[in-house]
Image: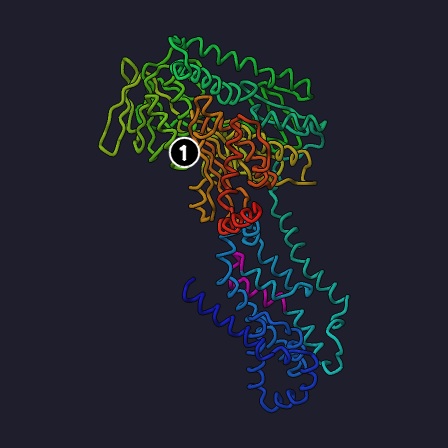
Amino acid sequence: MTKTKGLVLAVFVALIASYFVFDLGRFLTLDYVQSQLGAIQTFASENFTTAAALYFLAYVTVTALSIPGAVVVTLAGGAIFGLFWGTLLVSFASTIGATLAFLTSRLLLRDWVQQRFGNTLKAINEGVKKDGNFYLFSLRMVPLFPFFMVNLLMGLTPIRVVPYFVVSQVGMLLGTAVYVNAGAELGQIESLSGLVSPSIVFSFALLGIFPWLARGLLGLLRRPRAPRTFAKPRHFDANVVVIGAGSAGLVSSIIAAGAKAKVVLIEKHRMGGDCLNTGCVPSKALIRSARIADYLKRASEFGIDNAGGEVNFAKVMERVQRVVTAIEPHDSVERFTGLGVECVSGEAFIRSPYSVEVDGRTITTRAIIIATGARPFVPPIPGLDGIDYLTSDSLWELRELPKELLVLGGGPIGCELAQSFARLGSQVTLVDQAPRIMPREDDDVAALVMERFAAGGIRVLTGSKAQSFERTAEGGVLVVETATGPLRLEFDKVLVAIGRKANVEGFGLEELGMPLEPRGTLKVNEYLQTAYPNIYGCGDVAGPYQFTHMASFQAWFAVLNAMLGGLKRFKVHYSVVPWATFTDPEVARVGLSEQEAREQGIAYELTRYEIDDLDRAIADEEAHGFVKVLTQPGSDRILGATIVGYHAGELLTEFVLAMTHGLGLKKIAATTHIYPTLSEANRFTANAWRSARIPKHLLPWAERYFRWRRG
């Protein structure tokens, strides 16, 4: 505790103690004030300035200390000084006292409360930052809310001092005047309970609601509106036109069709988008083949000698395409047509907020959903355009395994593909200018993956910036700047995997003047609306998370808002966002990491379980990795979970479910898990949390009790 906090606390405690020790509360009762009213009025008429100063100081003290009796003191102000002076004195004294109480609460309690319950209060804090003045004004206008509680609670929030003072001054003025005016009849008042009539209280309540009505009106006025230069058709061909048949577009279409809305889905290339054709599905098929190749190398660990095996890369890639073909019907035109979606093949162009053109055909629509996805970002490195480089879109055409593969980028895509090609037989070098691979994960997570990369023969150069490319007869050379100087890296093929760029060009957004975020994604609000109220964006083109499952998640909000046309709006939220990187070991996470918690100043407690102690992992020769969970201090509430190990993506689901539905580690610990399974790692982690909180100081007493029970 700082000296300032200690001093303020000491003064506060001393004043409160004095109030009780000297029974000062007897001076703040209606009976006492009425009995002394004549003498006080006489003193005030003869010594107005002194009386006003003493009254002002007493009122500030009563309010600052949150002592009961403010109503009586307010009435006394009206009886002693009249309506004008009484209102003036009470108004400023009550606001100053309230602000002192507010500051005391902030100084003594806010840091502790925010540290302990910061994650729980995050939504409240954001609401106060955005609309705190509305909240405060409404509370001040309605006398049903105890003002001292408002002072103390507001001190725990991020609301600023000056707005707090000004809003309190204005918000309490009318109520102050009513009570001061009532004080003129103080001698005849028998009870405080009936002082303010129900009609007055109702009037205050209506005034308290007024800021919210004004806010709602402002919200309507601020909603994005289509420029009037675009004529709105009298008849529409569709309720919703969806551009892009990836995850976001497919989910949007199927929901709209299921609600019996007329929906047109436009795709210029292949149904299923990147996920099916060049992303999730083919990469996981490749990873599986690479893992089998690695198992063959490790066969002796399982007691199998002379397990030969030669990688036929062409057959591996044929298998990848076979997997894509097997899943293709799930996203096919035939399936979606059968579900009621009109599927159109061609390049869409948005002519207006109400019309989309496809190969000469104009479709008028109530709403448009842009789900055009993203593509690999290719950096402007000198010489790269002269190299026959690969991306996550184009590498699936390969049928010959590169002898020396250079991977540019240490994020999820680069790491997954680098390990897969290394296991299939390529000599792989991974280059990234970041200090380490997988920068979104914690240090210990990246370190464990790096160990496996090193064991697999992958050369990793972090903190190394690509300077230029040179084409050679065998492939090419990359010049990189490292901490020790420039380095030349030869390669047969180079895979560029340093991120993805939203597809926002070439289909009318430029002509509409559609705003974009600094990172190049479509700018959308919390309802996934663009600058035009009936044009929505979801999936990779909108961000902020470029995951297939988040594209599907956003699609639900976008299409519902699009179909309902403003009658009811649904806010998208990102409170529980899981993801996984399918390296070996897999890395899966939901919620906060330790790195993020530290950066955001969020207090947490850490529980960790090492998977090398798990029976099933030992039996499967996969005894590596860990589970770590961040919890709210003093609670089992989960703030985040990270799993590194075999099938981490599957294991994470239990924590995703728990966080989504507000279940804590105690519930996971109390859930029966099948033995022997990998999922027991989650229960053991929860048990570790519980064991660390056993009241060990009571164990000697328990030992004595059981000794006594034995006789």
Q: Is residue 65 magenta?
A: no
Which quadrant holds residue 656? top right
Q: Report if residue 92 is visible in the image.
A: yes
Of the 4 image quadrants, the one containing the N terminus is bottom left
Which quadrant holds residue 59? bottom right
Where residue 5 appears, as percent x and y from the top left, is: 45, 65
Where residue 632 appears, as percent x and y from the top left, is: 51, 46
Q: Residue at x 30, y 18 (%)?
A: 491
Q: Is residue 167 magenta?
A: yes
Between 682 and 466, the residue placed more toward the observer is 682
Residue 70 higher or lower than 51, as above or below: above
Between 401 and 222, the residue placed more toward the observer is 401
Q: What is the number of callouts on the image?
A: 1
SS category of the residue bearing label 1: helix
Residue 87 higher or lower than 101, as above or below: below
What residue would you read off at disc 1?
A: 445
Where residue 137 appears, as percent x and y from the top left, is: 62, 61
Q: Residue at x 57, y 68 (%)?
A: 98
- Describe the colour scheme in one phrase: rainbow
Q: Residue at x 35, y 23 (%)?
A: 407
In the picture provided, is 665 more to the left or to the right than 390? right
Query: Label 1 sits on what residue type?
Result: Val
Q: Crowding at label 1, few (<14), some or many (≥20) Cα neighbours within 10 Å?
A: many
Chain part drawn in magenta: 156-172
Q: Main secondary structure of the magenta part?
A: helix
Between 410 and 455, the residue placed more toward the observer is 455
